[in-house]
């Protein structure tokens, strides 16, 4: 989800709720402690220099059980970050600490924001010798195929 999308969704909501893909909700007394832009400059295993930018939201649970972040407050924080930091309309990455700090993509299911698990990948598979995934074939039922060569089919 890009920043412009969340800015369109927030005014339509009564509450801001985040949930993990497994259905677990982020406690409703969370705080958005940071909104920023992260730039990652790196070189992949194939030697290609890459640059990635994302908007970063950091969620934090405090012992402030009376706190509830309302949509207009989050929208204000986003607008302030755009004005002061020059944040662009980029993909949003959310940091949230469960057992450890996790980074998540952001989605919306029509009611709640969903923290989508991120995965790693090799960006230079053609350069570092990782074979292409072989096509999987279902072998069940091939023994009944008359065009298949079997010991008693007479094809050999």
Image (cartoon, grey):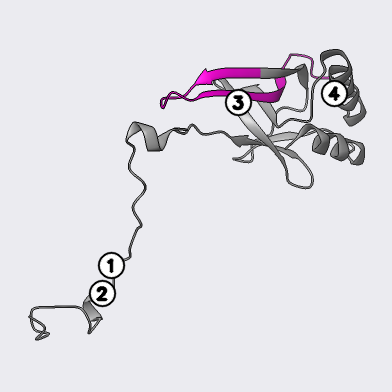
- Of pointers 3 and 2, the one earlier in the residue sequence: 3
Q: Label 4 crowding class (10 Å Cα cut-off): few <14, some 14-19, many 20+?
A: many
| Helix, strand or loop status at disc 1 | loop
Whether tag 3 and tag 2 are in contact, CB under 8 A, the answer is no
How far apart in space, not on screen, are marks 4 and 2 (Cα)? 58 Å
Q: Are marks 2 and 1 in contact (CB under 8 Å)?
A: yes
**Residue 142 tag number:** 2
What percent of the width, then of the height, locates residue 113?
A: 74, 37
Residue range of the region highlighted in magenta in the rendering: 39-66
Label 2 to label 1: alpha-carbon separation: 6 Å
At label 2, counting other C-alpha atoms closer than 10 Å, the crowd grade (few under 14, some 14-19, many 20 or more) is few
Q: Are marks 4 and 3 in contact (CB under 8 Å)?
A: no
In the foreground, 65 or 101? 101
Q: Position of residue 13 (x, y in %)?
A: 88, 39
**Looking at the image, which is closer to me, 34 or 125?**
125
Residue drawn at the location 41% of the way across and 25% of the way down: 45
Which residue position holds label 4?
A: 78
- Kindly identify which residue carries mark 3: 103
Q: Quadrant of the N terminus?
A: top right
Of helix, strand and loop, which one carries label 2? helix
Q: Position of residue 135 (x, y in %)?
A: 36, 57
Q: Earlier in the sequence, mark 4 or mark 3?
A: 4
Q: Main secondary structure of the magenta part?
A: strand
Could you say whether the residue bearing mark 3 is in a helix, strand or loop?
strand
Asked whether residue 42 is drawn in magenta, I would say yes
In the picture, measured across the screen, residue 30 lies left or right of residue 152, that is right
Q: What residue does disc 1 label?
A: 139
């Amino acid at each position: 989800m890009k920043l412009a999308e969340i800015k369109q969704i927030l005014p339509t909501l009564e509450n801001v709720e985040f949930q993990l893909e497994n259905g677990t909700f982020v406690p409703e007394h969370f705080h958005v402690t940071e909104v920023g832009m992260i730039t990652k400059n790196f070189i992949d295993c194939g030697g290609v220099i890459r640059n990635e930018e994302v908007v970063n939201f950091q969620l934090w649970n405090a012992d402030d059980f009376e706190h509830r972040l309302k949509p207009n407050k989050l929208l204000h924080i986003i607008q302030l970050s755009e004005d002061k930091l020059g944040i662009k309309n980029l993909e949003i990455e959310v940091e949230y600490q469960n057992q450890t700090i996790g980074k998540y993509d952001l989605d919306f299911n029509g009611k709640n924001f969903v923290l989508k698990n991120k995965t790693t990948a090799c960006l230079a598979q053609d350069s570092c010798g990782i074979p292409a995934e072989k096509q999987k074939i279902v072998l069940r039922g091939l023994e009944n195929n008359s065009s298949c060569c079997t010991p008693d089919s007479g094809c050999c």
